[in-house]
Amino acid sequence: MPSGDKHARGLIWGKPSDAQRGNNRRRVLRAIMVAPNTQVRLARFTHLSQATVSGIVQDLQREGVVVVDGNDSERGKKVSLTSVRGVAIGVEVSYDSVIVAARRVDGPRVEVDRSSRGAEHGSQVWIRECVSLIKDVVRRTGLDDTDIVSIGLGIPAAVEPRTGTISQVAWALDWERGMDVGARLREHFPGVPVIMDNEANFAAYGEFLYGGGRGAETVLFVKSSTSVSAGLVINGLIYRGRHGLASEIGHLVMDPQGVVCQCGNRGCLETVVGGARLVEQVRRAYIGYRVDLPTSLANVVERAKSGDLLCRRVLQDAGRGIGMALARTCNLLNPEKVFIGGELGRAADLLIEPAAEMMRQHALGGMFNYVAPMTVEASELGLQAGAQGALAFALNVDHVQPA
Ligand SMILES: [Zn+2]
């Protein structure tokens, strides 16, 4: 078969009647599409035995679907795809932005685009932005809409793992409990599976697969932008909890007498370090002065980076607030690696040290003292973590061929 004639959909979308052998084969293929890897790592990723993976890889090699390269030891050889037609999509919808990532399943290059109109602009607007961004990035990969294999959709709401619908969302958005936001996107890409989850869960998954969390056993990712949320990956799996509300660090109560939060509680972390609160602090301090007031968290971050002392102080204090919440979280979870991402991840040089200092003060010392201490770092993937994680997650779900 000439290269490029193989279609990813045909290779990895199964039929309901498929035997176990076909399922395993597709599982291995999907894992290679998520990231080319050694057979040992593919076995770990797919939870299949090494013998099963090895047999499947030999078959795929004979059929010209994969190549096994590298001249070092047998274990070190990497399995990757030959030319296959297919593109995977990841979307991260935030309050004030939509970020879309696209990657051909047979290559490493990720195309990313962004719109500054997100969930807070209403569903009609963000879906329109999202569809147009997807079409653009797909075109940039040299493929077209009919080659889309899957779409991962990260949203700023908790998603019930059993039903794939919203289990809790801020009142400020035009979404409600029980809603399947992905259905709106599916209308524009008929037949393409749209897999929805909380955006911080996907960010943690992205960081675990492609960023600083590669190979780590437990990854905790805090996304701090307009809202504050977190995702947790344990042994390669996203931990969601019974209702998809696990790791909602933004709603840890830091001060029971504090400001009322959009969730209905008082004094949540989000009321202390959420984007609107940080912008408000800066604006209030400048009342009566003839200065340009920041209108967004991105503004505050930019100003802090260019030396504005007031903005720097606000972000350093936010780092301390996040560190305090992380100290409590880490005492429960004892993760291996902690990442701070979202808009505040861009100010990591200001934030990380105050956060780490609070964690050293308030979390159990054993996490920091031994041979492999817990680390706290800025997200390596930055604002792309959620979209890249969404892309990989949806690609790796077992899809049934539409009739
Ligand atoms: Zn809250």
Image: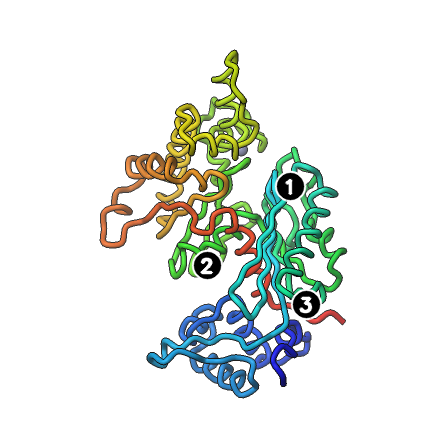
Amino acid at dot 2? Tyr
Between 204 and 180, the residue placed more toward the observer is 204
Which residue bears the numbered disc 1? 118
Does 196 sit left or right of 321 as displayed?
Answer: right
Between 386 and 305, the residue placed more toward the observer is 305
Q: Is mark 1 within 8 Å of ligand 1?
A: no
Report the coloring of the rendering. rainbow
Which secondary structure lies at badge 3? helix
Please tell me which residue is depicted at 29% across the width and 39% down the height of the picture.
360
Real-space CA distance between mark 3 and mark 2, rounded to the nearest whole angstrom: 23 Å
Does 245 sit left or right of 313 as displayed?
Answer: right
Label located before the other in sequence (3 or 1)? 1
Q: Is mark 3 within 8 Å of ligand 1?
A: no
Which residue bears the numbered disc 3? 147
Judge whether 17 appears above or below 161 on screen. Answer: below
Which residue bears the numbered disc 2? 210
Instruction: List x then y, in percent, for residue 6.
Output: 64, 78
Between 358 and 265, the residue placed more toward the observer is 358
Residue most extreme to the top: 288
